[in-house]
Image: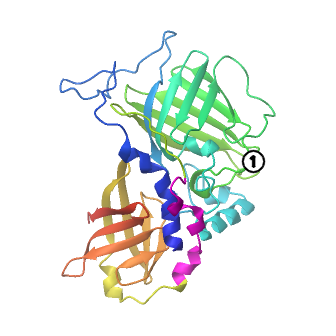
Amino acid sequence: MHKIALAAALSLLPASLAAQWVNFPTPGIPRTSDGKPNLSAPTPRSADGHPDFTGLWAMPLDTAIGNIAVRSVGDLQPSDIRPWAQALIQQRSEDFGRDNPRYKCLPEGPGYSTGAGGLKRFIQTPTMLVILNEDLTYRQIFMDGRVLEADANPSWMGYAVGHWDGDSLVVESSGYNDRTWLLGGYPHTAGLRMTERYRRRDFGHMEIAVTFQDPATYSKAWTVPVSAELAADTELIETICNEDANTGQQHWVGKLSDDQKTAVKVAPEILAGYVGLYKGPYIQSLRTVEVTLVNGTLFVSVDEGPKQPIFPQSESSFSGTGLTYRFVRNELGIATSIFEGHVSGEYEFKRQK
């Protein structure tokens, strides 16, 4: 049951994407000759000449979720992580990340900037940028000339001010409590300071560089690049976490190490038939799963993330990252596809090589 519990939490966030309003043309946007949104059109600008970020944006989903490990993230190396934080990351991995505020239906604070996924509504005025999230949280970025609070009262969403550097909007934030997580289960203290640089390079594409600085947790500041695409001809729909009582945390039991204890023996030649690269649609993007075999153990790497061991619960079904993996083989014993199991269903990824 523990393997399904994490998938339940994962299914809470992107569930609304499949239910977004469709066939509702966004008014006033440039379009190509066939009527499709022209995402390569010039960057729109506000009356003061600055780029206008107003719009609905599709943000990436953090593929490290369910795949917690001490690893390189952005330009952060494992050696840059303080020992106490490394130990905490390992513990969160063993517990399937069950204490992640995301899974407890709590705000994600700085996590929204790098990998919460889903759609976000940006509303820009000359003195403020407001960001609305699907889970009914919001963020206020003050652009009226005020300075960043030196000792802001700790909160879930923090305190943010912005200023222009040419065509880039620079946002500085502080005042976060220490209950939120960064990418992949990485912790932070209340001393965290975050700097973001937003650049809308054309009508439909936005590039963001997010820098975290927390000397008590990391020996250096580290930066994660993020990209977003304008979501045209659709609308923002609320996503209420844990609305379905059947996918709540009451079902969250077990530990990562349990999968290894219940593993069964599978012949090496069968395992070898699963090695390969698999791709397929997942939420609003394309997902890649690479399967390798090292010393008799299968490993999966999702979207070029860290290699995580998975353990056979039968000849074709494996677990070990918080999700399940089921292989489909042909008559030669070679896997033709892999199914990644979530409570919301299985996602099929086809073998590429």
Would residue 186 be found to the left or right of residue 337 on screen?
A: right
Dot 1 corresponds to which residue?
215
- Magenta part of the chain: 242-260
Please determine whether, in this image, residue 74 is positioned above or below residue 275: above
| 73, 110: nearer the viewer | 110
Q: Is residue 253 magenta?
A: yes
Residue 187 seen in the figure:
yes
Rendered location of residue 30, percent (x, y): 30, 21
Work out whether 74 lies above or below 144: below
Q: What residue is at 56 percent from the left and 61 percent from the top?
A: 248
Rendered residue at 37%/40% (across/down): 20
Number of marks in picture: 1
**Residue 66 showing in the rendered view:** no
**Corner quadrant of residue 81:** bottom right
Percent across and percent down for residue 59 are 46, 41
Residue lying furthest top:
47
User: Magenta stretch: residue 147 in it?
Assistant: no
Look at 31% across and 84% down and name the residue there. 270
Q: Residues within 10 Å of mark 1 (few under 14, many from 20)?
A: some
